[in-house]
Amino acid sequence: MKFLKRLFKILLFLSITAILALGGAVIYKVYPLYEEYSQEAKKIVEESNTNTFKRNLTSYFYDDEGSLLTELSGNGSKIYLTFDEIPENVVNAFIAIEDRRFWEHKGIDIKGMIRVGVEFVASGGETVHGASTITQQLVRNVFITKEVTLERKVKEICYALEVEKKYSKEEIIEFYINNIYFANNCYGIEAAAQFYFNKPASELSLNETAYLCAVPNSPSYYDPLKNSGNALPRRDKVLKDMQECEMITETQRIQALREDLVLNEKKPIEIKDYETTYAIDCAIRYLMKLDGFLFRSSFATMEDYNFYMETYNQSYERLRAELYTGGYVIQTTLNKEKQKLLQESVDNALAFDEEMTENGQFALQGAATVVNNETGKVEAIVGGRTQNNGTYTLNRAYQSYRQPGSSIKPLIVYLPALERGYTDRSAVTDINVEKAKEEPEKVLEMYGAKTTLRAAVESSKNGVAWRLFCEITPEAGLSYLQDMSFARIVPDDFYPASSLGGLTYGTTTVEMANAYSCVANHGKFQQTDCIISILDKYGEELYEPYETRQVYEAEQAELMIDILQGVIKKGTARKMGWKSTVEAAGKTGTTNNSKDGWFVGVTPDYAMAVWVGYDMPRELNNLYGGSYPAQIWKDAMEALVEGSEHERFETTTEIVNGDEKYYPGRDGSEVLSPGYTVQNYRDDHALADRIEALIAQIAQETDRGQQEAYYEQAKALVEQIYGQTLKGAQRRRLEEVYGTYFN
């Protein structure tokens, strides 16, 4: 017994000590932030008025010449109810489910704050959720971003305290109920009632009221149109809480639960053209960025990807509603003349097929995106053929993910190979792809016809791409797409079939044009969009251009452009008949059974990606990258570059091939021995020079991991040497290096 009493005293002492320590830590963390934000909140709230809390502002989009593209407003967003007009059941429902002490507290719940503070310290700063009063939720929606951080929580408290000082409780609950989001661009109970039940809020039944008041807790999950049943359990909780608070009787609760719930929603038809829908998407994504959403392009598992997409869609939906009602003014780079030109190119090339689907859309479709290489911005985008009925149900240019076929090869196979020591003249092996599928473990040992890397690109040799991709590894090859923010590269894509464009979800014309623009820009990538300015309702500029980053080495990117010019001059796109004096480079892409056709290419001024196919994939005779997609690309690009001052691709590095160092003045085709030319000799010794440079780096490097990386690069270069004598000598050289540094 004495032992237990002693143990109890020890535990009590430790608990009190821990609580005091936690309290001190919370004060240490919070107080400086409170000092900083309290003055800010006082000033901002003092300057506010009732209009500050009204979600009734229209957003406007303009093209590159200042002409209005579209204006956006929410569903019923201009409908505002005063406190006296809000049904009593609505007020009671929100108070019961969200903040039972609303009428008593001064804006914050002290007990809840202590709990959150303890959780914050105990979790090492990871947990800062909960304890938000209605006032805090209001100021979070109006004054503060949604990013969950301790700073945001402190700022939220400061603003809530100031709002409670300036406005009455009746005004605050009025602001809250008119401001809260009910999904589908509906802000406020009146907008929600009219949109979902086609009646004013004053006529809502208790059942309907509780159902709608359940939605704002998670508008995406409880969306009445997409997930009508999800909100029912929370509706039940709303009714139960109201009954516990004696706002309704048990009889009323049971009666409400027994009533049928029938939606009678209004479904407005949105008729927007392709450039407008894309501009809206760009603006939403940027608002997500400002809101703290972390965009990802790499996923550990498919479950990880699916969870990410769920959170992405929730954030997207919420910020879309914000765009519709936030009073933004957005300037874009979209050009009316270029848009018309691109649309006509798509329409004319596909006019031969008039088959229609059940919903009145053309069955055969096309999409295209034009990116300005200098600015990195989209200037024209077409998501389908022009419809006579004027409706655009899908913008395929950014919404349809399709397998890109061979157009992906330069990005994930050939440029990575160039960065690992291959040259355009390197001898590569065209293996049998079907045999490679049967014996994947033997791919690197398989024999086949020899060709150069340049010729393999020009004629789109699948066997070469498959083998090189396996040598590089799918993880390394696809990492370049991840670095360029391709949105749907998933764990299931890390297999050899991706080398031929066989991706799980695929890519879009926006992503492909963006990536080829990166290659044309000497390997420097900038996330594309069509936005140059976003002004908020106060006239403050929110937009800053995305930062650039080097994805490919400049020298290799420029060599890739040179190789891709051969695709148009004498390769798979030669029948396109490019006649302009402006240089052009590109790559065709065709998927199995001709279900998707692509052409992605660049000129010094523009990058353009074109896709042709059916929304529900099926075969189309004569569909391949060099046919309809190349025709669209050529027709549009020739008009775009007419009169351009930039006829040649700019190069910033000199591509050294060893001609002057080895056998200077000799013709590369001269035969030195059977099957071995002067050019083979030059290429082999250039590789040997690079191997020696790597060996020198191994000697200078102190980090073991980096030494091993250099060694592996050197080994890969040795295997590219064509002459067996030099290859053997270099292998022995590396054996010596291994013995010196790694044994």
Image: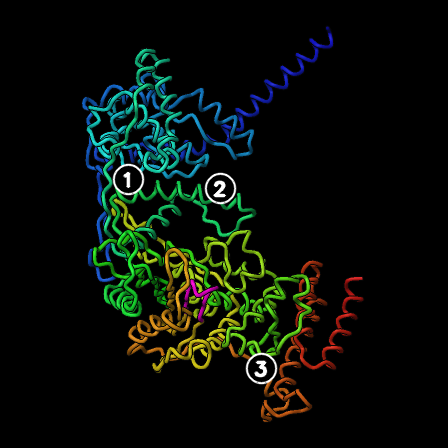
The reply, left or right, for residue 402 in relation to residue 741 is left
> Mark 1 — residue?
185
Mark 2 / mark 3, whichever is N-terminal: 2
What secondary structure predominates along the stretch shown in magenta?
A: strand
**Secondary structure state at the residue bearing disc 3:** loop
- Which image quadrant is residue 347 in? bottom left
Name the amino acid type tagged 3. Asn
> Mark 2 — residue?
307
Q: CA distance from mark 1 to mark 3?
A: 60 Å
Q: CA distance from mark 2 to mark 3?
A: 49 Å
User: Which segment did they paint magenta?
Assistant: 588-600
Of the numbered discs in the image, which one, if any, rests on residue 216? none
Q: CA distance from mark 1 to mark 2?
A: 24 Å
Mark 1 / mark 2, whichever is N-terminal: 1
- The answer to whether one can see residue 242 in this image is yes
Residue at 29% across, 69% down: 352
Crowdedness of circle 2 by 10 Å Cα count: few (<14), some, many (20+)?
few
**Secondary structure state at the residue bearing disc 1:** loop
- Residue 461 appears at what percent x and percent y? 54, 73
Q: Are marks 1 and 2 in contact (CB under 8 Å)?
A: no
**Secondary structure state at the residue bearing disc 2:** helix
Q: Nearer the viewer, residue 311 or 354?
A: 354
- Which image quadrant is residue 315 in? top left
Q: Is residue 591 magenta?
A: yes
> Mark 3 — residue?
657
Quarter of the picture holding the N terminus: top right
Residue at 21% across, 32% down: 198
- Residue 517 appears at what percent x and percent y? 42, 67
- Which image quadrant is residue 108 in? top left
In front: label 1 or label 3? 1
Name the amino acid type tagged 1. Asn
